[in-house]
């Protein structure tokens, strides 16, 4: 039985071959960046939710009135071109995954995508994480696996970078083993100590850097103005999130 459980809202769910995945990394940068991605003019978007057993979604605020909502743990937005063909799917995991479940969740997500898309799957992972001190905190860094290709010239993630993030390490391990074409987009980030930190200048810069890089790779639009109307407000489960590095993946 899959660790992922589809909710009733998931009827008719469609996944495009090109998929971007963000999750509650050490500062929530990946989640907020992907939530800011929008379809280009002439394109449309459909949204679904997927529940993940044992995980509780962070609540988020959206809109000028600041309403708080708690969507399904895995939010899926699929963008369609003017002809109605799916071109990219944005997956946002709105939960901090406890360390004992990280490999299970990573495996379930990759299996779920392979089942929906098959061998055409191209995965883009967006996250903030601790990077070597030699890395420029203002730049996005990229790494590709299994022959994945991206347009343009990008800064390559140093080869000796330690993946101090259980989710990204698990996803890289699984995608390497299953030959999934994968692109990593990472920026240097730091753990938030309190909710108010999610709106400070340095954190907003992390989100904006991830969002703009993701938009270029995925061919969509990043609405930086939407950051004013979007915030993760429930961080209580982040206490379960490990930040000491993953010895088995380097």
Image: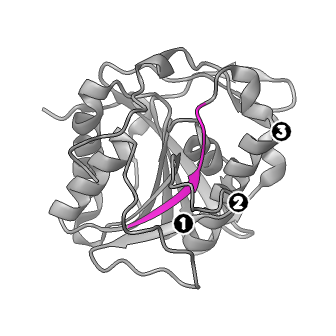
Q: Nearer the viewer, mark 3 or mark 1?
A: 1
Split into 4 quadrants, where in the image is the N terminus? top left
Query: Which of labels 2 and 3 is toward the front?
Result: 2
Q: Which residue is mark 3?
A: 228
Residue at horizontal 55%, vertical 23%?
58
Are the residues tagged 3 and 1 within 8 Å (C-beta)? Answer: no
Considering the image in quadrants, where does the C terminus appear?
bottom left
What secondary structure do most residues of the magenta stretch adopt? strand
- Relative depth, front residue between 82 and 127: 127
In the image, taking residue 41 as reference, residue 86 lies left or right, namely left
Q: Is residue 36 left or right of residue 249?
A: right
Q: Residue at x 47, y 17 (%)?
A: 239
Tag 2 secondary structure: loop
User: Which residues are drawn in magenta?
Assistant: 183-191
Residue at x-position 57% and y-position 20%:
235
Secondary element at image label 3: helix
The residue at the far front in this view is 134
Which label belongs to residue 138?
Answer: 2
Determine the residue located farthest toward the top in the rendered image: 236
Where does residue 20 sit, x and y in percent of width and height?
A: 47, 57
Give the percent coordinates (x, y) of residue 191.
58, 32
Marks 1 and 2, how far apart at CA: 10 Å
Q: Name the residue beneath numbered marker 1.
A: 141
For the point 57% across and 78% down, which residue is it? Answer: 154
């Amino acid at each position: 039985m899959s660790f992922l459980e589809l909710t009733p809202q998931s009827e008719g769910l469609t996944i495009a071959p090109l998929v971007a995945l963000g999750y509650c990394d050490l500062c929530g940068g990946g989640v907020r960046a992907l939530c800011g991605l929008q379809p280009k003019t002439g394109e449309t978007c459909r949204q679904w939710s997927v529940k993940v057993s044992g995980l509780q979604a962070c609540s988020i605020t959206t809109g000028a009135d600041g309403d708080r909502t708690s969507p399904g743990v895995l939010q899926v937005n699929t963008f369609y071109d003017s002809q109605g063909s799916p071109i990219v799917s944005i997956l946002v995991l709105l939960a901090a995954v406890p360390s004992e479940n990280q490999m299970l969740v990573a495996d379930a997500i990759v299996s779920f995508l392979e089942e929906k898309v098959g061998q055409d799957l191209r995965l883009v992972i967006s996250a903030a994480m601790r990077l070597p001190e030699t890395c420029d905190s203002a730049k996005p860094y990229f790494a590709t696996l299994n022959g994945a290709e991206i347009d343009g010239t990008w800064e390559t993630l140093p080869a000796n970078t330690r993946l101090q993030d259980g989710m990204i390490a698990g996803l890289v391990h699984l995608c390497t083993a299953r030959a999934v074409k994968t692109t990593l987009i990472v920026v240097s980030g730091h753990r938030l100590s309190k909710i108010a930190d999610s709106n400070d200048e340095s954190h907003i810069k992390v989100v904006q850097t991830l969002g703009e890089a993701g938009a270029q790779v995925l061919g969509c639009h990043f609405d930086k103005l939407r950051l004013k109307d979007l915030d993760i407000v429930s961080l209580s489960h982040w206490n379960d999130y490990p930040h000491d590095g993953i010895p088995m993946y380097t």
